[in-house]
Amino acid sequence: MNMQHINYILTLAREKNFSRAAKQLFMTQSALSQYIRKQEQQLGITLFNRENGPITLTPEGELYVQALEKVKQDMLDFQRQLVDLSELRTGKLIIGTSPFRATNLLPKVIKEFIESYPGIELEIVTDNMHRLKSGLASGKIDFCIENDYFEDKLFHRETLFTETHYLAVPKDHVLNQTLKGSILTADDIGNETPAFFSAVPVSLNQCEQVNMIGVKPENSFYKCHTDILQEAGLMPRLITSVDNIETALRWAETGIAIALVPDSLILQGGFKNHPNYYKLDLIHSQQNIVFATKAGQHVSIAAKRFLEILRMLIGYGTWNIPQ
């Protein structure tokens, strides 16, 4: 049994379709079908039901796939431990995150890590949450740094810091006259001035008939914003949904409409001009950003070193990394 055999079986089990699986494996559908049939003959069992609709695993196939997943994880852990034994001289670290965090949170960490451990190759995978979790579960990604939407049974998570969302309102917007709250500047938020601590939160109920900028469903902030709006009981009048949160803030600053934006963007986005900001009186306005690995997966020394640097630079985290 080798990794190629494992990937063939697991890919077909995941895709439930010979054509899609073959495409991912860079082979023809007929070649994959012949390979699977040959393996079933050698094992003396049927792994896949090939009748109507998507193919499914037989009971024997389910047991076999579970065993292969464990073997694959053990092989990956063995490879990671070999890297550890090389004392960080060689190896590769694959990190999953959103484009936003790759742009705003990780650059200084990446620079420091590369300078400290030049023999370790870094690969940053930027994608939406669904595909990041899939990559993490399959072992294609070593760990993720993203919003805490990772299931308890499948992933180990550790909170790195808490991200707070604010209501961003253009400075000349009429809403500033009706919001019963305290206007904050980017400096207030970044330096936690007396005005920051005394600021009165606002209710989104006052934004019912106001134009708002949303983000598209594939954006990492979509679920967070949906949770905030649902908690507020608000159905906003979205004038558009943008690809990235930076655009939402830029449009709010320009005066197009209001938006929900995280403090990490306000502080790290490099914006010279800002709209007015308001605190929100909602639980979901605060979201944990976590380090996540596949449950039970070995955490390499390289990953621990990367996270130590991240901790040093952002000043957050308890870092109970499993040994």
Image (spheres, helix red, strand yellow):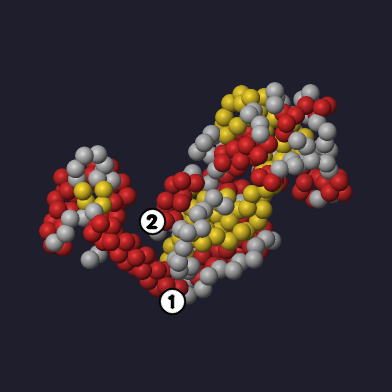
- x and y, in percent, of residue 290 in the image: 58, 56
Circle 1: element type: helix
Q: Nearer the viewer, mark 2 or mark 1?
A: 2
Residue at 56%, 39% (x, y): give it. 222
Q: Is residue 3 left or right of residue 137?
A: left
- x and y, in percent, of residue 232 in the image: 68, 36
Residue ranking furthest to the front: 59
Q: Which residue is mark 2?
A: 138
Amino acid identity at mark 2: Ser
In the picture shown, does residue 265 fall above or below 307?
above
Residue at 42%, 51% (x, y): give it. 134
Q: Is residue 254 visible?
A: no
In which image quadrant can residue 296 be found? bottom left
Task: Determine the CA span between mark 2 and mark 1.
Answer: 24 Å
Amino acid identity at mark 1: Leu
Q: Which residue is mark 1?
A: 85
Q: Is residue 91 visible?
A: yes
Which of the numbered marks, if any, corresponds to residue 236? none
